[in-house]
Amino acid sequence: MSLVNILKSKCVSVWGVGYLGYTTMLRFQNAGFKIIAYDPNIEQLQQFKTGHYPNRDRLISWSKVGFVPKLNFDNVHVASNPRELFLNSSLHMICLPDKRYMLEVVKFFRGNIKKAAVRPMVVFESSFVPGHVENDFINKLASYGKISGRDYMVACLFRTDWKVESFFMQKDKMPIAGCCKKSLEIMRELTRYLGIETIEFDSIKEAELYNNSLNAFQSVANDFVRQLAFGYPGVNFKKLAQLLFENFSFEECNLNIGTGGMRMTFALDYLIEGSDNPDKLTLLKESQNVSISSVLSYAEYLIRKEYKNVAILGITYSGNQKDLVLSPSITLADYLIKNGVNVYMHDPLCSGSEIKRLVKGVKILPHFSDKPLSVGAIILASDHSLYKYLKPSSVQLLCKKARLIIDNHGIWSRIMFSTKARYHQVGDGSLFLSK
């Protein structure tokens, strides 16, 4: 299976004739493909067959201005039976935004995947629960002896557009992934041929998680503004919300143990304090709790895994700045000490007496020497230059006896540690804090 095989027939089977399916057909038809279309919703399929499609209600739903380009129905074969989708096409685009139809899709693929030189390529455009494609399609077919990568290829090209204007503008890169290297390679070639900008993921589940997260961001942003409107009833939020959406841009993501000193979190306190109805601002209050719960999750993990001696490098929230506001190190150290853990701390910007005044019961680490730290876990909390520019050999010696290294900023990510030491960068998926 390759792009050559797809372009040889230049025919694509589209499962679903709703917004996703219709716009997918537009894209492939513009690239010179013949279309075979089918929808398990028979009523919708019958409407599509008439050629007078989309109707007025769909035009309003699919477009901001009520206009959607027409398909050339002379170049579209409407399948009356799903088996027709397998006759002349090796490329299947699954455009069904309702996962209730997945059992039916699996049934037809089970009965129509044949051992052949050209394996069918199945591409999902809708994302549901992360793991859906694997659990409800790949694994189901595997139970019938149809193995992905061997009998067929499967990949994703997930969509986030809700209107045809967004579809044609395509501001965001579309996430792609495959069941194997070959399927990803085919998707890379196909999207390049179609002129689609993409971002690649290591697995379909990862792409599903990304796609759902994008939609969740939008949903939470809407709820956030809605709550602010309740919290500040005298403000014209119709205008303010539009300005927020037009002018907001994300800064670099700071994924860390806790607040990491992000002063923007003070904005949560300010918004709640100034509100006429602070009880309505539940999203902001929950966000306040996230940082502290994250810190405590790491502390609970260390306690549960019986790390008796822990070293925390850095007490200030940010590298090379003596600023202790929002420092997760203090909260982490306090909690560990109260639960019987010996905590050793070091910060090049704070004296031992200063650290002891901030954290009761802490033990002070002397300036780094040529000896390893005698602790089970090391937490690199601050990105001070002293830590960042240590020679790899010095870092390796420092961590020689440690079983766990938690790097809050990823500054030791290129160091090769001993096989007995687990290196964890916050958010890398290598540490299951709940176990």
Image (tube, helix red, strand yellow):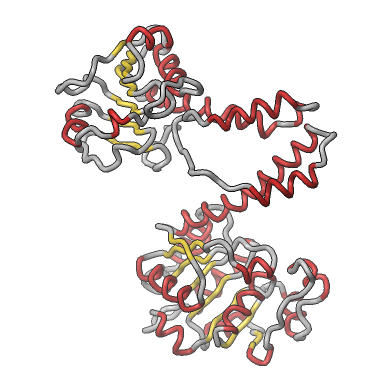
Percent position (x, y) of residue 214? Answer: 58, 52
Q: Compared to 43, does 297 lie above or below? A: above
Pick whichever, 87 or 317, lies toward us.
317
Residue farthest toward the right in the current orientation of the protein? 234
Which residue: 64% across, 30% down? 268
Pick whichever, 128 or 210, lies toward us.
210
Quadrant assignment, res 309:
top left
Which residue: 51% across, 75% down? 195
Percent position (x, y) of residue 330? Answer: 44, 18
Which residue: 40% across, 70% down? 183
Pick whichever, 225 or 136, lies toward us.
225
Q: Compared to 180, does 26 lie above or below? A: below
Percent position (x, y) of residue 255? Answer: 46, 38
Classify residue 384 as left or right of residue 285: left
Classify residue 73 as left or right of residue 154: right
Tell me the quadrant of the picture where the N terminus can be found: bottom left
Q: Is residue 42 visible?
A: yes
Pick whichever, 87 or 419, lies toward us.
419
Quadrant assignment, res 390:
top left
Tell me the quadrant of the picture where the C terminus can be found: top left
Residue farthest toward the bottom in the current orientation of the protein? 74
